[in-house]
């Protein structure tokens, strides 16, 4: 586990963007695993800036998102489809057919899980970007999720719903269920970059780096990944 401590969110985003753009330039058919939430927004801004200024091309890049809420259609402004479109995809030259996000509005969610899992099996993710929940979740794999889990439906923790309610008008609008890549899917990525910024992530980062590897802290499994970089700012690494 390589740990890079930086001063703040801006530096974290700069370094993450440097890794991603370097890889894409070397390997124009990279398969990226992507996250939503506040953490990667700065990274996505920098990827867009680099695309505009340096013409880095996403024509042959494929992306797989970690998760999606169940019950929100793709055009709902709180869906992760919408988030990704707004924060990244509409601003780069990615081919729509190369974008994969679980469909949380599928009629048959179990079938959607199986199909998304199949797609992941048929594609190796070269670089997975991760954020972390203050309870140590990765994707929507909440504490207690099996390390051998694949794509599945999750009942969200009340803490996670509370944390995510900042994007909604009120907490009862936050969906109760989501579909997520499992921990096994995440661990199959060739390389992982975990990003964390802010005080509220300090305990989770401490547990991930120094605690026991336990299903009670889903991110702790990342310590066993052969190629993981953790980019943490001063606040998130204050206990490390
Ligand atoms: C999002 C995801 C989540 C977030 C985590 C942190 O696709 O998988 O695990 O990375 O909840 O969220 P933020 O970045 O909003 O603090």
Image (cartoon, rainbow, N blue to C red):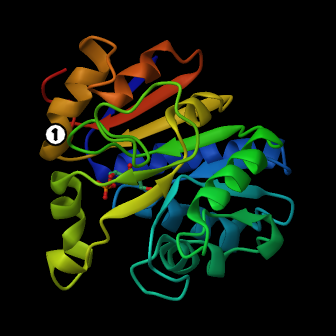
* Residue at point 47%, 25% (across, down): 147
- Pointer 1 local density, CA inside 10 Å: few below 14, some 14–19, many at least 20: many
Residue 7 percent coordinates (x, y): 25, 40
Give the side of residue 110 with respect to residue 207, left or right: right
Instruction: Please say if 106 is above or below 182.
Output: below
Where is residue 219, by image quadrant? top left
Instruction: Please say if 1 is above or below 109.
Output: above
Is there any visible trace of residue 2 in the rendered image?
Answer: no
Residue 126 percent coordinates (x, y): 72, 37
Where is residue 60, by image quadrant? bottom right
Instruction: Please say if 53 is above or below 60.
Output: below
Is there any visible trace of residue 11 in the rendered image?
Answer: yes
Residue 32 percent coordinates (x, y): 68, 49
Q: How many marks?
A: 1
Q: In which quadrant of the rendered image does the C terminus lie? A: top left
Element class at badge 1: loop
* Residue at point 53%, 70% (across, down): 104
Residue 210 percent coordinates (x, y): 25, 13
Residue for badge 1: 235
Which of the two residues, 117 or 207, is positioned nearer the viewer here? 117
* Residue at point 63%, 79% (across, down): 91
Which of the two residues, 144 or 92, is positioned nearer the viewer here? 144
Whether disc 1's CB lies below 8 Å from ligand 1 is answered no
Give the side of residue 49 with respect to residue 156, left or right: right
Which of the two residues, 178 or 213, is positioned nearer the viewer here? 178
* Residue at point 34%, 54% (across, down): 10
Give the side of residue 116 with respect to residue 35, left or right: right
Instruction: Please say if 157 is above or below 48.
Output: above
Where is residue 58, by image quadrant? bottom right
């Amino acid at each position: 586990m390589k740990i890079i401590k930086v001063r703040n969110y801006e530096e974290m985003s700069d370094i993450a963007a440097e890794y991603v753009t370097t890889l894409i330039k070397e390997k124009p058919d990279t398969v990226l695993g992507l996250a939503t939430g506040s953490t990667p927004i700065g990274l996505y801004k920098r990827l867009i800036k680099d695309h505009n200024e340096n013409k880095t091309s996403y024509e042959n890049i494929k992306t797989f998102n970690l998760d999606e809420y169940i019950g929100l259609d793709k055009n709902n402004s709180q869906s992760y489809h919408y988030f990704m479109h707004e924060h990244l995809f509409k601003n780069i030259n990615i081919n729509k057919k190369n974008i994969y996000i679980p469909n949380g509005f599928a009629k048959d969610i179990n079938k959607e899980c199986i199909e998304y899992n199949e797609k992941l099996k048929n594609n190796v993710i070269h670089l997975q970007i991760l954020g972390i929940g203050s309870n140590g979740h990765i994707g929507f794999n909440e504490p207690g999720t099996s390390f051998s889990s694949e794509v599945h439906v999750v009942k969200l923790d009340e803490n996670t719903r509370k944390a995510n309610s900042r994007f909604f008008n009120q907490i009862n609008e936050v969906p109760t269920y989501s579909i997520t890549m499992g921990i096994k899917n995440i661990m199959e990525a060739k390389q992982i970059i975990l990003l964390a910024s802010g005080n509220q992530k300090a305990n989770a980062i401490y547990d991930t780096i120094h605690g026991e590897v336990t299903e009670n802290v889903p991110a702790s499994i990342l310590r066993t990944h052969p190629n993981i970089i953790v980019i943490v700012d001063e606040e998130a690494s204050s206990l490390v």
